[in-house]
Image (cartoon, rainbow, N blue to C red):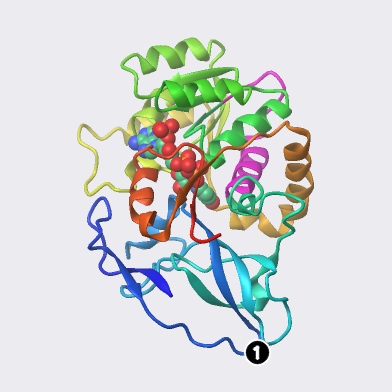
Amino acid sequence: TTRIVLAQRPHGEPTDDDLRIETGELPAPENGQALLQTLYLSLDPYMRGRMDDAESYAQPVGVGETMCGGTVSRVLDCPGGEFQRDDIVLGYGGWQSHSVENARHLVQLDPDRAPVSTALGVLGMPGFTAYSGLLTIGQPEPGETVVVAAATGPVGSAVGQIAKIRGARAVGIAGGPEKCAHLHELGFDAAVDHRDDDFVEQLTNATPDGIDVYFENVGGPVFDAVVRRLNTYARVPVCGLIAGYNATSAPEGPDRMPKLMRRILTKSLTVRGFIQTEFWNDQKSDFHRDMSGWVADGSVKYKEDVVDGLENTRDAFRGLLTGKNFGKLVVRVSD
Ligand code: NDP
């Protein structure tokens, strides 16, 4: 088996020395386990956090351990008989060509219902993040304005399209003209390029009635610009802050926290962070019903960015944190 282990904790952007490629043997699966061949590996921004040992909502990956991650795999062997050989399953095999996993933690996928890679994107964790965070915390009403950044990614694209289904106006923020053009194809009402010099002006023009829901995926200068346009009683589900994931020091300039707190106070804002797992038990069946229906009838479209070969995982992951991916990033590890 080939795997990518966390060799040392990165400082800033993860280097090839931080993430070492190794080959080795896997233990034979015992009763209750399954030996799996990885087909698709999901790359997600949260993995950068798992490389650090700062306090967080989840345990970090240990130095010397295989990097974690969601996977779609083929069953090679399952001694307890929970799965048949060649069944396709969703698991958490990590950055490796093969894995041995607890069979109870695997979910069988039906390749005739949807492309199996969608279990890592629109029909999986990122899609659920958009669904639960937007509907539970954002609560968009018809006619309101919903803004989301990283809007062509799996979370952001689903946020905008669900906002449209709910009758709201969807404004997407993305990096570059190609991504902005794609937002129009997805049915967003307006697209704003945060890499353009006139980003703030574009945002103002795209939100003539202000902003009622800002689904926060990025932080940084985008957040600074958005805060000024939030309406009274606006809701801000805080989902991710990717602009800072590789940061090695605090941003320069004066402390803007007092100004932000004052804005929260005077505009009666609701700012509420969440980790999608908190909603899973209560909302997973609604999510599966709604999202598979929307994907089937075309009201939610999705785009995947498929990178071939486990050896290209590290480059692809660095690209995810700098905006090189275009759509849900997955690595095709084998056919
Ligand atoms: P994406 O595929 O959208 O990838 C990240 C995108 O972020 C990049 O393509 C880039 O898009 C944008 N980006 C990167 N750096 C910056 C920056 N400095 N400023 C502005 N935009 C930037 O990722 P996901 O859809 O998987 O995840 C989106 C967010 O949701 C992340 O913050 C992630 O951590 C969070 N998340 C949170 C969960 C939770 O439970 N709370 C669960 C899942 C995800 P562009 O080129 O358009 O700028």
Task: Tell me which image quadrant ligand 1 sits in.
Answer: top left
Whether residue 312 appears in this view of the structure is: yes
Q: Is residue 214 magenta?
A: no
In this image, 306 relative to 73: left or right? Answer: left
Residue located 63% across and 49% down the image: 118
Q: Nearer the viewer, residue 268 or 42?
A: 42
In this image, 58 relative to 16: left or right? Answer: right
Question: Considering the image in quadrants, where does the N terminus appear?
Answer: bottom left
Q: Which residues are magenta?
A: 126-146
| x then y, percent, for residue 117 | 61, 52
Classify 10 Å Cα crowding around label 1: few (below 14), some (14-19), many (20 and above): few
In this image, 329 relative to 34: left or right? Answer: left
| x then y, percent, for residue 24 | 38, 80
Q: Nearer the viewer, residue 68 or 141?
A: 68
Q: Amino acid at mark 1?
A: Asn
Q: Nearer the viewer, residue 286 or 119?
A: 119
What kind of element bears circle 1? loop
| x then y, percent, for residue 201 | 39, 12
Which residue corresponds to mark 1?
Answer: 31
Question: Considering the image in quadrants, where does the C terminus appear?
Answer: bottom right
